[in-house]
Image (tube, rainbow, N blue to C red):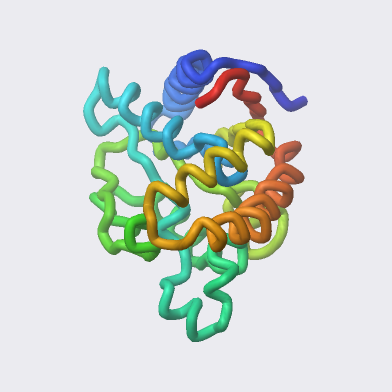
Amino acid sequence: MQDRQALSPEQALALLVARAGALAQQNPGQRVALGLAGGPGVGKSTLAEQLVARLNGGQPNLAALVPMDGFHMRHAKLEALGTARDKGAPHTFEGEDFAQFLTRLKAADGPVGGPGYSRKIEDVVDDAFTVAAGTTILVVEGNYLLLPDPPWDQVRPLLDLSVFIDVPRDTVRTRLLKRHAQEGLFSEERNREHIERVDLANYDLVLRSAPLADLLITITTPH
């Protein structure tokens, strides 16, 4: 049965710290993956960064952040495919590569580097992070970790604990408008169109995968 809880951001962080620690203790000598899923704008990235920082505060390199966003298709490829306007949708990611990377990362016994994504240039950045050899907990973060459709269906079995972060749709719209405006790369008209056509459609799609999570956390206050 799915564990469902309504928590403030700080309560959610405290719970995830405890669950991550328990996961590591239950699997001694193994690298474990805790997945944070949810739609765009729900605060997954911030929560994942805070979780890694809190875990590493007591033991350096205990945890590492593994962002799914580093597996966006490169912008030049999207342009060539004619799908640049859809950037952020499931078909604009290298889902198969992400699943293979996570598989390799869980089994690795040496340092492994991985890609990230920069909103300032709207493109992939190589070698954005490195998972140290002694890292025990992988905090995997992304929209599509729980999607049941290929190739994303390869990801869920790699997660030792899957968590879905839920925030109201109207709150997400407000956050996304602010996020896009801060970067200043596009017009307000373009940003509004993209949010309605792509981001909120992705939010609705991802929300349908929430029942597949082990733990569903509804954030009760602004994140």
101 versus 45 height, above or below: below
Measuring 63% from the left and 59% from the top, which residue is drawn there? 198
Q: Nearer the viewer, residue 83 or 115?
A: 83
Q: Nearer the viewer, residue 76 or 4?
A: 76
Q: Nearer the viewer, residue 136 or 178?
A: 178
Measuring 47% from the left and 64% from the top, which residue is drawn there? 72
8 versus 87 height, above or below: above
| Residue 210 x %, y % | 71, 38
Count the labels in the image: 0
Residue 22 is at least partly visible in this image: no
| Residue 113 x %, y % | 28, 55
User: Seen in the image, is 59 located left or right of residue 137?
Assistant: left
User: Seen in the image, is 166 located left or right of residue 204?
Assistant: left
Q: Which residue is most to the bottom?
A: 80
42 versus 109 height, above or below: above
Residue 66 is at least partly visible in this image: yes
Measuring 45% from the left and 62% from the top, which residue is drawn there? 186
Q: Quadrant of residue 90?
A: bottom right
User: Seen in the image, is 16 located left or right of residue 56?
Assistant: right
